[in-house]
Amino acid sequence: MNSKESLRRRFLQLMTENVKSELLLLMADNNEATSSILADPYGKISHKTLDIITTTLTPLMLQRLKHNINAWVNEELSPPCLWDSRYACQQKMRIFNLLSPKLR
């Protein structure tokens, strides 16, 4: 694996972990969701967890999650930045689409 692929993989893992952390904060009262999020391996969100999350997330929760992830990505992409910003934005949108029930 070359360094560009390695950086992309690392960014996706970090962003996924950040999404999971935000979800844990938003869904602290939902035992099924938190258990599923915690059971997923590092840097991954399973289809089972996505199904639980998308049925549990309210529009307001999704909006807050997107706001917090956008802020995190913007901070990560500020100079000096090792990440590929185009790839980062594509992956952010992919995750947002997966979490939006209308788009799944």
Image (tube, rainbow, N blue to C red):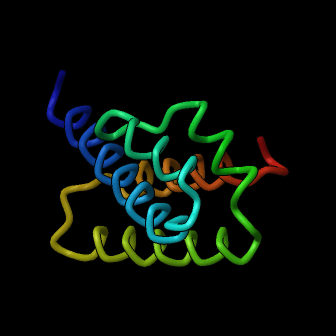
Picture quarter with the C terminus? top right
Rendered location of residue 10, percent (x, y): 24, 43
Residue 64 as seen in the image, left or right of residue 76 = right
Nearest the eye: 94 or 37:
37
Q: Please count the marks in the image.
A: 0
At a point 59% along the width and 46% down the height, the residue shown is 94
Rendered location of residue 82, percent (x, y): 19, 57
Up-down relation of residue 25 to residue 49 (above or below) = below
Rendered location of residue 62, percent (x, y): 66, 68
Residue 61 as seen in the image, left or right of residue 11 = right
Nearest the eye: 101 or 89:
101
Picture quarter with the N terminus? top left
Up-down relation of residue 16 to residue 21 (above or below) = above
Up-down relation of residue 32 to residue 28 (above or below) = above
Residue 64 as seen in the image, left or right of residue 15 = right
At a point 58% along the width and 59% down the height, the residue shown is 30
Farthest-out residue, right: 102
Nearest the eye: 86 or 102:
102
Up-down relation of residue 52 to residue 29 (above or below) = above
Rendered location of residue 67, percent (x, y): 55, 78
At a point 33% along the width and 33% down the height, the residue shown is 41
At a point 53% along the width and 70% down the height, the residue shown is 26
